[in-house]
Image: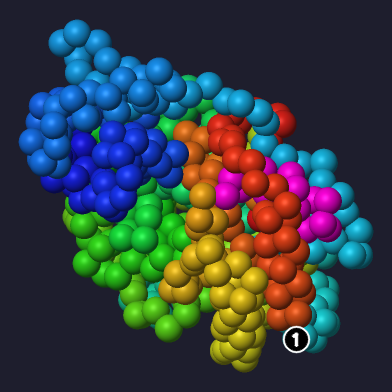
Amino acid sequence: MVATARLVSWLAPSLVHGALSEGLAAGLRGLVLDGRLLSGTRLPAERELAAALGLARATVSHSYDRLRSEGYLVSRQGAGTVVRLPAPRFDRPDEGAVSGPDVIDLTVAALPAPSVLTQAAAAALDGLSGQVAGNGMHPLGLPALRSAVAARYTARGLPTTVEQVLICSGALHGWNLLLRTLSRPGAPVVVEQPTYPAVLDAALAYHVRVHPLPVDAGGWDLSQLATPARAPVLAHLTLDGQNPTGLWADDPSRRRLFAALHPETVVVVDETLTDLPHGAPVTRPGAALARRGTTVVALGSMSKSFWAGLRVGWIRGPAELIRRLAAARSSDNLATSVFDQLLSVQLLGLADQVLPDRRAMLAARRDALLDALATYAPGWSAASPQGGLSLWVDLGGVSSTRLAQRAREFGVRITPGPRFTVTGTHDRWTRLPFVLPQDRLAEAVRLLATAAATDAGGAVSRRRGGPETAWTA
């Protein structure tokens, strides 16, 4: 059940103007659609909420009745009033979109390769001669790359040995390996909401029971962390440049998160964006802050820091679990490309040269995108991210699902907000990456604002999962 005081603070802005019952209904509806009130959450009784808000009970009853008729609430004798989501009205338009050189694609948050890539590739090619006499199969990864990754963690304050590192084909591959090894159909798994869509797709593909952990401008909302009868087997967290919100958890927040999770839950910290802070405070890896006895596994990747064309990532965790994961990968991915691993070793060695330039470029493009929003779409809002590659934009009541449909006609591709959720919420939000040149970003926002102005309608999409969902990088 949501705390009454917290609900009152959320609802206060909705009760300033107009009919109180309409404002209360709109406020509750908005909290559900934004994922702040999760499906299954029990609301305060009508009399209790009316007293806390200073309203007549009839006003609250009228609002509850309206939301019951719309499918947002369900009430049962003895069980109280519980949040529900209405049935979906139409599918998401996030695949089958137009493409071509004139299309501005804002569905992918990935940078072009750094200029040193060809130099690093030449050095990697020289090193390939020392590998060709073998069979090229390294289920745990090349020793040189495992050593380089272990050294990075040690330098960040988390002593790590080679035995604690497995090289895989990207952070998503690592998440799939963990799901395959540790979960079973129906097992509870905690996932942030909103989060990177492929994290949700992978969890749903393994038929686990996903429990959303709401994330908003205030951070990770532990008050709504589900407590299932069984301890969640896994919890997926992105604490550095959370995708899509751009939040960066400080050390005290990390400790609170770990303390709130069940001690038997394996905490998976996705560090894909850890190299790309925006002036965020320096923080230690999650495993260095977890309470004793908690298993923390870190996922890393070359894709965001260096180049998405390099399908190389890693898992850092207890040596015994690393061996189990290496055995589990044999059914779908025997090993990662030797050449790509050699190239990754070279690029990691050039990190001090590459990453400052990446951060400076991203800062300029981030500011350009924020300026374009202020110029062309002043009714939309986005907080400057603390890290990562994108803005999480509040469209001010515009449906991102409808906007995505309409924007295709203007040559712009965006991903609707519900694609980042398991419950089909956040339809008034969309993620806008700032990885394109400044002029392209400004033109994209101008076109999106024009598309929104030509479509005054509004509707809400629901995430359904399944084969129709398109990937978003």
Mark 1 residue crowding within 10 angstroms, few (<14) / some (14–19) / many (20+): some
According to the picture, the residue beneath numbered tag 1 turns out to be: 116
> In the picture shown, does residue 230 fall above or below 14?
above
Residue at x 37%, y 39% (from the top left corner):
26
Q: Amino acid at mark 1?
A: Val
Q: Is residue 287 left or right of residue 377?
A: left
**Quarter of the figure that contains the C terminus:** bottom right
Q: Is residue 427 left or right of residue 93?
A: left
Residue at x 73%, y 52% (from the top left corner):
454
Q: Is residue 55 left or right of residue 227?
A: left
Q: Position of residue 70 (x, y in %)?
A: 44, 22
> In the picture shown, does residue 371 fall above or below 452?
below
Residue at x 74%, y 44% (from the top left corner):
405
Query: Quick one: which residue is furthest to the top in this view?
Result: 77
Query: Quick one: which residue is furthest to the front in this view?
Result: 18
The image quadrant of residue 225 is top left
> In the picture shown, does residue 348 fall above or below 30?
below
Q: Nearer the viewer, residue 357 or 284?
A: 357
Q: Is residue 359 left or right of residue 455?
A: left
Q: Tell me if I can see residue 337 in this picture.
A: no
Helix, strand or loop for disc 1? loop
> In the picture shown, does residue 184 fall above or below 434?
above
Q: Tell me if I can see residue 411 in this picture.
A: yes
Q: Position of residue 344 (x, y in %)?
A: 67, 72
The image quadrant of residue 432 is bottom right
Q: Position of residue 44 (x, y in %)?
A: 17, 30
Q: Determine if the magenta segment contains residue 317.
A: no
The colour scheme is: rainbow
Which region of the structure is painted magenta?
A: 398-412
Q: Nearer the viewer, residue 225 or 161?
A: 225
Q: Nearer the viewer, residue 395 or 6?
A: 395
Q: Position of residue 277 (x, y in %)?
A: 47, 77
